[in-house]
Image (spheres, rainbow, N blue to C red):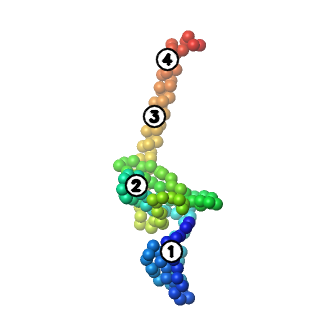
């Protein structure tokens, strides 16, 4: 990924001045650690511009599910949970240099944007609803085959 916002200046053998988006920081390289290490299974926070009008951003909890090592566009694949008004959807994001209006960062251990039991209950209810629609569709097909044969007798 491109990192055009970071500039480094050598201050001394052990320290560097690092500028990130206009903010200068002195970093002791003896104690510096790599802050973000992404791997499959890493919990992330997604800051995504809302599809509605304006500059509203929303935060979602997600997890990295894979990496696509494309030559021209390496990408991070993320599954995230979008919850609103008693509904929950699992959505997918392909994050790369061309992704607009989205930022990601590693989620700290205290960030829990949803309750597991609630999400499982909502998803289970969706399964029950889908099964009911399937049963209804089978019943309608059976009803059609049984009761609408009169329309097709002459054609046979």
Q: Residues within 10 Å of mark 3 (few under 14, many from 20)?
A: few
The image position of residue 1, as x and y in percent, is 56, 66
Res 50 label: 2
Q: Are marks 2 and 4 in contact (CB under 8 Å)?
A: no
Relative to 144, say whether 53 is above or below: below
Residue at disc 2, secondary structure: loop
Q: CA distance from mark 2 to mark 4?
A: 49 Å
Mark found first going from the N terminus, 3 or 4: 3
Residue under numbered circle 4: 148
- Pick the front one: 101 or 106: 101
Q: Nearer the viewer, mark 2 or mark 4?
A: 2
Quick one: quadrant of the C terminus? top right
The image position of residue 79, as x and y in percent, is 50, 55
Residue under numbered circle 1: 6
Q: What residue is rendered at 50% in x and 29% in y?
A: 138
Residue under numbered circle 3: 133
Q: CA distance from mark 3 to mark 4?
A: 21 Å
Q: What residue is rendered at 44% in x and 43% in y?
A: 126
Q: CA distance from mark 2 to mark 1?
A: 27 Å
Mark found first going from the N terminus, 3 or 1: 1
Q: CA distance from mark 2 to mark 3?
A: 32 Å
The image position of residue 20, as x and y in percent, is 47, 74
Residue at disc 4, secondary structure: loop
């Amino acid at each position: 990924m491109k990192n055009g916002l970071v500039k480094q200046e050598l201050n001394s053998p052990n320290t560097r001045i690092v500028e990130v988006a206009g903010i200068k920081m002195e970093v002791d390289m003896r104690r510096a650690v790599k802050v973000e290490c992404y791997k499959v299974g890493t919990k992330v926070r997604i800051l995504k511009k809302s599809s509605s009008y304006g500059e509203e951003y929303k935060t979602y909890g997600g997890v990295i599910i894979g990496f696509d090592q494309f030559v021209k566009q390496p990408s991070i694949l993320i599954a995230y949970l979008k919850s609103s008004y008693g509904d929950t959807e699992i959505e997918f994001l392909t994050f790369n240099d061309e992704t607009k209006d989205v930022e990601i960062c590693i989620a700290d251990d205290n960030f829990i944007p949803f309750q597991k039991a609630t999400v499982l209950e909502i998803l289970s209810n969706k399964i029950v609803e889908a099964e009911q629609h399937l049963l209804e569709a089978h019943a309608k097909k059976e009803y059609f085959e049984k009761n609408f044969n009169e329309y097709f007798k002459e054609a046979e």
